[in-house]
Image (cartoon, rainbow, N blue to C red):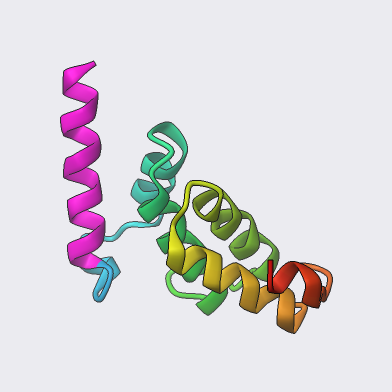
Amino acid sequence: MRTKVHVRLFFSCIICITSQNIFAVGAPDYLRKVATEFKDPSAQYVLGNMYETGTKVEKDFKEAARWYYAAAKQGHVEAQMALARLYQEGRGVEKNFEQAFV
């Protein structure tokens, strides 16, 4: 258990440090693993951003919304804002102003 906590913290630090230059290490598969296995909200947010912008993956707003939602559910503020923007603009999700401002 203790090892998992240390590993998760390590991954979170890497994600935070590299969020400005996410792909210095070459990360889509790596981030996907951290996001799914460790349920790391920072990794989930970064994946959402990757899919929204089409950085190192094919642009896919529906997939972006899925990852933003996973992070937002855990209280990740940037993911909550990004998901709200997608709802407001109707990208990857049905346009829904009520959902955007909840």
Between 1 and 74, which is closer to the camera in this rendering? 74
Q: Relative to residue 9, is residue 45 drawn left or right?
A: right
Above or below 38: residue 98: below
The quadrant where residue 68 appears: bottom right
Task: Please name the predominant secondary structure of the magenta segment in the image.
Answer: helix
Residue 51's spot in the image, x, y percent? Answer: 54, 68
Above or below 43: residue 58: below
Between 88 and 33, which is closer to the camera in this rendering? 88
User: Residue 101: within the magenta?
Assistant: no
Q: Relative to residue 64, is residue 28 drawn left or right?
A: left
Residue farthest along the top direction in this orientation: 1
Asked if residue 92 can be seen in this view, the reply is no
The quadrant where residue 67 appears: bottom right
Residue 46's spot in the image, x, y percent? Answer: 41, 62
| Residue that appears at 45% across and 53% down | 44
Q: Quadrant of the N terminus?
A: top left
Image mark count: 0
Asked if residue 14 can be seen in this view, the reply is yes
Residue 12's spot in the image, x, y percent? Answer: 25, 49
Q: Relative to residue 85, is residue 38 drawn left or right?
A: left
Between 77 and 13, which is closer to the camera in this rendering? 77
| Residue that appears at 50% across and 64% down | 79
The magenta span reads 1-18
The quadrant where residue 99 appears: bottom right
Q: Quadrant of the C terminus?
A: bottom right
Q: Relative to residue 48, is residue 26 drawn left or right?
A: left
Residue 70's spot in the image, x, y percent? Answer: 56, 49
User: Residue 3: within the magenta?
Assistant: yes
